[in-house]
Every structure is written in structure tokens, then in C-alpha cells.
Image: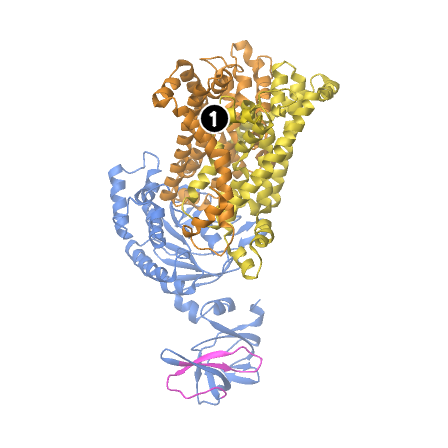
Amino acid sequence: MHETALSESRTVRWGLIVIALGFLALFLVLPLIAVFAEALRRGVGVFVAAFADADTWAAIELTLLVAAIAVPLNLVFGLCAAWAVAKFAFPGRSLLITLIDLPFSISPVVSGLVYVLLFGAKGLLGPWLEDWDFKIVFAVPGIVLATIFVTFPFIARELIPLMQEQGTADEEAALTLGASGFRTFLTVTLPNVRWALLYGVLLCNARAMGEFGAVSVVSGHIRGLTNTMPLQVEILYNEYNFVAAFAVSSLLAGLAFVTLGAKSFLEWRHGDALAAIRRH
Amino acid sequence: MSAAAVTGWVPALRKPSALPGFGITLGFALTYLSLIVLIPLAVLVARAGELGLEGVWQVATQPRVLAALKVSFLTAAAASVINALFGAVVAWVLVRYEFPGRRLLDAAVDLPFALPTAVAGIALAALYATNGWIGAPFAPWGIKIAFTPLGILIALIFVGLPFVVRTVQPVLQDFDREVEEASATLGATRLQTVLRVVLPGLTPAILTGVALAFARAVGEYGSVIFIAGNIPFESEIAPLLIVTRLEEFDYAGAAALAAVMLAISFLTLLAINALQAFSRRRFGDA
Amino acid sequence: MSKSFGQTAAVHELDLAVRPGELLALLGPSGSGKTTFLRLVAGLEAPTEGRLLFGNTDATRLAVRDRRVGFVFQHYALFRHLTVAQNIAYGLNVRPARSRPAKAEIRRRVADLLDLVQLVGLDGRYPAQLSGGQRQRVALARALAVEPRVLLLDEPFGALDAKVRRDLRRWLRDIHDRTGHTTLFVTHDQEEALELADRVAIFNRGRIEQVGTPDEVLDRPATAFVASFVGEAVRLPVDAAGYWVRIGPHAVRTPGENVSGPAELFVRRGDLVVSDDRRHSIPARVLAVRRTGGTRRAELALADDLPSVEVDLPADSVVGKGDVLSVMLATVRLFSSRSVS
């Protein structure tokens, strides 16, 4: 940087950098280090032993299952919503965009609660479900529903601004060349948004695997059956089994690392394709 | 509402377009949105409505509920303000200065989005407990952080940290350097330029970030309950009280409290939209 | 004065004396260093070497804010969150308390400036609510408010459409004549520079090629670059010796003595006239004839492998394609090829 009227003095510059670094170190880096330090507090042997627990494995499996259902469903929704909202003009469009973002500003506990009120034993459809002997709350379907709710906007909100910015010219060109509507979508629209799509899937998946509040409300905490990894962390922690709690946590922190790494890579490599998201 | 029905009437409402698939995609999106989000939320509102406005008011003004709302509100507000301050500094440093590790730091800002809240909760509790790395030095002074409202504040700073940084960063990136140069040629000192020109330009973004962080913080559950202590009237947050009511099978009470929380979310959302609309109108962009 | 960015010299050994009260245009192609020079004067860039004098005072090391220059940016650089009046008053409001005028005085100065730039009644508007031309006028008023020692305008009309440009051009000249500020303005539009300025400094590759009145740079270009850049000239490679110039196969006698050897001849429309004087003229084949306004314009080939040149003929001329005219050089702008890089 050249010495001009627009730069602060060295002292101010380094002062601000130190403040920023200190703040981030205190609130981001230290907690992350703490997770691994606590997990390895009694050595690698105890750390590894924490994964011998069958309930922990059941929790890992359930977490993967829930994400495997919730993410694809939200992906299909995201693509449909973005297509309708970004490629067409119709009344109520901006209201729809606001509604899609709604789950972001709702407390996770409330997100879980709505399903208890709907499907719980004393809920609206509770008695009817009981007749059919089908459990949603305190069972896997409830966990899946709550996860879908909280991860609902992730993919749609990455796609909408990008597809809006890209307009409809490419698709119209493909149609005039004789491509079918679906083929146009597959060969023109999808390649144009693939990086934003991947970005959204990444964030959606991280939240789906890590969600705690909403899932906690609908899960019922039945060991080996309705515990996801974050819930297993809570149980182990409340049993004062700290090493095991932090060991499972370290897996989730690893997931966070992978997510952030992949996200940064996408931003670095395909920043242009993602720029629209940052502008909105 | 089926997709076919939507196809039937919507083309009359939308502007003509050569692209296909409007009916089916909008139909699916609306159906999915309704099933997953709107209908369950409507049930919640209806459930709270059974109590009547008066009933909701009664629930909301119970001393324990009031205390929990107050704790949630005040800690969330304090955390958002602290995040506004430091978030603006972090954004400034990331955009304006070049230093080793800048990219890594930039990536790390999103950690609270990626790290499950329960993990953050137990990690912060371990750090700030009286025997933790940060808690221990404060203990001899009689300052307890974990298991007090101070702990809640710490957790909420953590979850809200990325919001201000990420709303301010792009605005600062696109900030017209010529405007700062103009200020300098007109005789302003660097501090005057930053305070009178740059900061007002960033204010809408900072406020948006604060509102987003506040909305997130006021409803936060996972990271707080491990570090909060959860003592009624002191360190019990509103979302936890909802869970407690639910465990007592007091569905109506839980619904009423949730409705209050929902109203707060709506108001915050409304405030953000109004702010952005104002800023667009007044300054010509978002 | 010199300025380098890393290894590349943006402006090189510039020496320019600006007369008090004059309106000087810095003209040149993009990347020629004119904007860098303007920013050096403003203090927005620091020179690698050299000195900047305001009158007798050395301003080289003076901070931007202490230079009292009025800088008008191409894209206005208005403060979006301040009203028109607040924008104009900004430079006065940021002064330290002891030299800041009283509130009433500031209000009065703002009112005067609004009047000067013809924006009375718009003082409460925000920049986003103004047209491009109005914004540029606010920017000028804001720069004038601090009573600058020198007014610097960087492509002030560059972002405006042609009609507004022309109006503002005349208006700027008018303001300059009324306020008498020493003014430097950067432009790449020669029409703008020639119409508006008292003198023009022509920039090329970080150097000043010539400083002079519009007449001087048009009629007596100091260098081949000036000859080709100012006015639309066709460049012809020729051989020169004494009073003679050989264009292709033909030699023509010129009004003055020339350089010798390979040279570049710059021919503008109007430099060539049709003549019967065989001794001073050369034959030119008519390639095409077009009617433009009050004249008939012929495109001529002086030789097969040379670029074509144009000559204006009377509207009633019956010359057609394929005819051969004899033309002579009324004005000669000739530069030795060695001086042309």
C-alpha cells in the first residue's frame, strides 16, 4: 500500500489488527482448541474407547440418516423455489422469499415445538396417529421433520439471488434451439448454478448434522434410538462423561472444519459464481 | 393445493414467459413450504390462540416467564452490541489490511455457523468454568462467568459473531475509495473521514447485522444451556422455559411463550426489511 | 516531478507551470499519466521525486487535507448519507473549531454556492435523488466551498451523456470566469479541452508533449504525437528534403523548409486544397465522394500504398469517383521519423 492520505498510521493499523485477532482468538479459536484438548485429556486410549459405545454409534448412524433425508428434500425444494421465484415474475414473489427465510429467525426450540403440538400425544393429530400406531414425535420421523424445518432456507437462499441475476436469456436461447424444458434445466440452468448449489448443500448439511435445539425437543432422548450426535454429546456431558462428550464433539468439530475448508475453497476457486450471494 | 390447480390459475397472474415449469415448481415449493413451515406454525398460533389474547398475556406476564424473557432479551441485546463493535473492527481489518493469516481468519469467522451449537456450548462451559482456561484467572477475584448470565452473554457473542462481519464486509469491499479521498481533499483528518463518511456508509449494514445477530441470539438454545446455569429468575432463558413447560406437558403454556418469541422474531425481521428499504430509497442501494 | 508505481513510471520528469487564474486542460489518451499528475497535485499520491510549488511555498510534503485543493471526481464521490447542503458544507464543518466559520456563515456560503451552481431549492435532497449533471454540480460546489488554491477536475464530465456534457462545459467556463480559480482539468476528449481551456497540456506515456493555447497545439504541434492526437490527422510516411516532400511517387513543394530524410506527414482535412498550380501540386485519385452538410467531401488516394486522405469540395462540384484531382499542401506538419517512436 502506498503512503497516501487514505491509510491509518502504523500504530492504529496494528492496534486494530491485534484487537480483531484477540477477539477472534478468544471466541473462535480457543473453544475449538478446548474441544480437542478436553477430548484428549486422558490420552488417546480413552479417546478411542469413547467410540466403543454402541449408543454412540447408533447416534452417528442416525445423524447420517437424518442428513441423508433432509438435505436431498431441501435440495429439490430449493431448486423448485428458485426456478419459480427467479425465472418468473408474479404477485407475492417477495412475500414468498421472506417466508422461505422465515425458519432462520425462529428459535430452534420453537421449530421443534410446532411438531410436538401437531403430532405429539396431546397434539392436533396425536390421537389419530395413535390409532394408526404411527409415531412421529419422540421417533425418527419427528427428528427428520424438525431438521428439515431448520435447514429449510439454506439451499434456496443461495440459488435465488444467483438465478435472478443470471436472468432467463440462456434458457430462452436453449428453448429456441429446440431443447425441451427439462433438458434446458439440466444442461443450461444447472451448470450455471452448480457451485452455488454445492455451497448451499454444504451449509445445509452442516446444520442438519449439528442441529440441537429443534431435534432435542422432538427426540425424547431414547438412547440408541432417537439420539443424534449432538444429543449424545448432551447426554454424555450431563453424565459427567466429559471425555466421551468431547470425543463425539471432536467428530462434529471435524465436520465443521471440512465444511469451512470446502466453503473457503469454493469461494476462492469459484468466487465469481458465488458473488451474487454476497451482494444480496 | 395441488400443482395442477396452481397451473390452472397462476399463468393468468404472472407475466408471460417462454420458460416452462412455472406451475409445477411453484406448486411444489408452496406445498412443501406449507407442509413443513406454514401449517405447523399456524397450529402453534392456533394453540396459543385457544388461550385468547388475555391468556397469552397472562402466560407472558408470569414472573418466571417475564424473568426468562428479560434474561434472553438483555443478553441478546448486549451480545449484539458487542458484536457490532468488534464485528465492524474485524470486517475493517479483513478488508483493509494485509497481514499473514488473513485468509485463514476470514474463513474462521464462519465457525459459529458450522460448529454444532451443543459442541460450542460444552466447549465454552469448559473454558469459562472456574477451573477452565479463561474462568480460572477470574475466579480469585470472585468473578464467575460460566453458570451466570455472563456465561449466556459469552455464548450469544459466539453464535452472533459472523453476522455483523458478514454484512459489513461486502459493503466495505465495495466502498468507493474516491469518497474517502474527497473527504481528505476537503480538509478532513483521517479520523473525521472514518467517523463522518465511512461509518455512516456502513451503518445500515451494521444495523442489519445487529438485527440478524439479535434474532439468532434471542432464540438460541444449544450453546446457552450448557454454560447458563439455568437457574429460574436468574439465568434461565426463554427457549429453555419453553422446553421445561413442554416437559411438564403444559402445551398451552409452551405455545403461548413460543408465540411471544415468534412475535419478537417477526418484529426483528420486519425491522430488518424496513431498514433495508429505507437505505435503498435514501442512498440508492442496499 | 516523477511518480513510479513499483517498476513502472506513471509520470516522468514532468515540469508544468500553471498561471494563476488560468483554466488548463490536461489532455491525453488513457494511461498517459494525466490523472496521476492531478492526484500528485492534490496530494492523493506522493511523488517519487520532484517538488510541487503553490506560488512560492513548497507543498510537496503537505498532507492532502492541508493543501486546500478542490478536487472533483469523475464519479462525483458525493457523500450519500448527507444532503446536498450538508455535502457542500462538509469541508467547512470538518475544520478545527478555531478556524471553522459560524453556523450562520456556513449556511450563507452554502446558499451562495447553491445559487452559483444553479441548484437552489435542492439543498435538502440526497445525492441518490439527483441526476448525473446535478450531482456533478454539487461536487463542484462542495470543492469550491473550501476556497481552494487550485481547482482540480478529473474527467468531470466523463460519466455524463453527450448533451449534458456540452451544457456543463459552457457552464463550467462561465463559473471559472466568474470565480477566477486556477483550474486544472483532466480529459481525454480533445473537443472538450480545446473548447474550454485557456491552455492545453498534452500528455503521452507519462510525459508532457506540449503546453500551449488551443491554437498553438492545433497549428504548431511540437511533436509528432501532438500532431496525430489533436485534430483528426492521417499519417503518411514521406521523404523530405529542403522545400520538397516526396509522397509516394510524387514530389511536392512545400511552403517552408523541412527536416531531411524519412519523415511523417500529418494531413488533416483542410490541409489539402485543390489547385491548378502544377508545380506545387500532386495528382490524387478520387476514391469516393460523399455529401456532408454544405460541402462535398472527397476521399483521395495520393499513392496506391498510402492511407487515403480527405478534402472538402464545393457542394456543386461535379467530381466523381475515379477522377484525378491535383492537390497542394496548404499546411505542413512534418516530423522526422527519428522523432517518432
Q: Which residue is mark 1?
A: A124
The residue positioned 56% from the left and 75% from the top of the image is C263
* Position in image of residue C45 (x %, y %): 49, 47
* Position in image of residue B150 (x %, y %): 49, 17
| Chain identifier matching the yellow colour in the rendered picture | A
* Position in image of residue A231 (x %, y %): 60, 22
What amino acid type is highlighted by mark number 1? Leu
The residue positioned 46% from the left and 20% from the top of the image is B251
Q: Which chain does tag 1 point to?
A: A
| Chain identifier matching the blue colour in the rendered picture | C
| Residue C307 inside the magenta-drawn segment | yes
Q: How is the image coloured?
A: by chain
Q: Which residues are magenta?
A: C296-322
Query: From this viewpoint, is residue A246 visible?
Result: yes
| Chain identifier matching the orange colour in the rendered picture | B
The quadrant in which residue B193 appears is: top left
